Amino acid sequence: MTWNGEGWTASRCFLAVHAMGWGTATASRVVRADFGGVHGGHHRPHDAAPASRRAPRQRWRRLPHDAPQSSLSTVRRSPAQALGLRRGRLPRHIGLILDGNRRYAREAGLSGAEVYRLGAGKIDDVLQWSHTLGISEVTVWVLSIDNLERPPDEVEPFLRVIEAKLRELARHPATIACRRHIRAVGRLSVLPASLRQAIDEAERATADHTRCQLNLAVGYSGRQEIADAVVALIRARLKPGMTVDELVAEATPEEIGQRVYANGSDDPDLIIRTSGEIKLSGFLLWQGVYSEYYFCDVPWPVFRRVDLLRALRSYQHRDRRFGV
């Protein structure tokens, strides 16, 4: 960087941030920006000092030619802004339909247990990316009631992976650091006893965590959730001598909403389904009435940060009207 009497000049600096990486440009005035650890391409002159002795890398963005001199100072950006996302336009709650495990296993020559472990590890990545971007609640559909109808030699490894993942998440340093509460949503009575015990232990271990929320949809069916909520309402409101009309009057959306599996959570703003299938399969039917949807071609085990960012950018370009 040199001062030529009229403004700053830069020659070998990265000046522009693009959605998929760093671009190059020139300008008469630039300002340093701290991108909080977001990685992109990097140019190192041949005579630069070794990494162990170099000062922290700086990134640069262009300012208008008439920008005031006071603008020539370090500007801090949030990770979301650094990745081309708009401030204040991110979802607070995202839902994920984890599809494509078996398809990817066939293509990659993996066993069922191997691909399920790979997919379980991907949950850690998504939670980290979401937390960095300020997305406080994530609901992940890991097991449907229909999945339990598959052959035992396929279901049992899957259940063991889910159980192990729950126990790992409950004591994971990231769970403790970000104060993430873990909750299972679904018809838990259909699950094996050992898995129900792991769920109970994870929920109790994180019961006092209130900063972030992870909902694991296990033994879940959207239709069954609504049916179970209506049954719970009838049991709570039915009184001796009550007429059918009086009971029907109790069945309001508010009363039913208080009895769904995921009661107490905000409705999801964005629901993402992986592996290219364009369907809901009954995921969060009650809560997703005003959600935005994004369908990604990549199978869940190889879901990448760039795939999440594409979904978020798509979400930010939509005009949400909530039925109005």
Image (cartoon, helix red, strand yellow):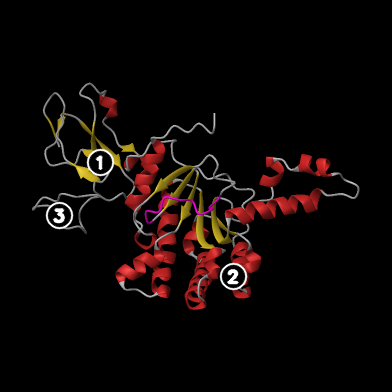
**Badge 3 amino acid:** Ala
Q: Secondary structure at mark 1?
A: strand
Question: Residue 114 versus residue 12: which sits nearer the camera?
Answer: 114
Which quadrant of the view contains residue 299? Answer: bottom left
Task: State the mark number for residue 18.
Answer: 1
Task: State the mark number for residue 49.
Answer: 3
Q: Kindly identify the residue that appears in the image at 60 percent across and 48 percent down.
A: 265
Closer to viewer: mark 3 or mark 2:
2
Residue 277 painted magenta:
yes
Q: Which residues are magenta?
A: 275-284
Question: Residue 299 versus residue 202: which sits nearer the camera?
Answer: 299
Q: Is residue 36 visible?
A: yes
Asked if the residues shown at circle 1 and circle 2 are in contact, with their CB atoms under 8 angstroms apart, the answer is no
Cα–Cα span, label 3 and label 1: 27 Å
Q: Is residue 292 left or right of residue 148?
A: left
Q: Secondary structure at mark 2?
A: helix
**Badge 2 amino acid:** Ala
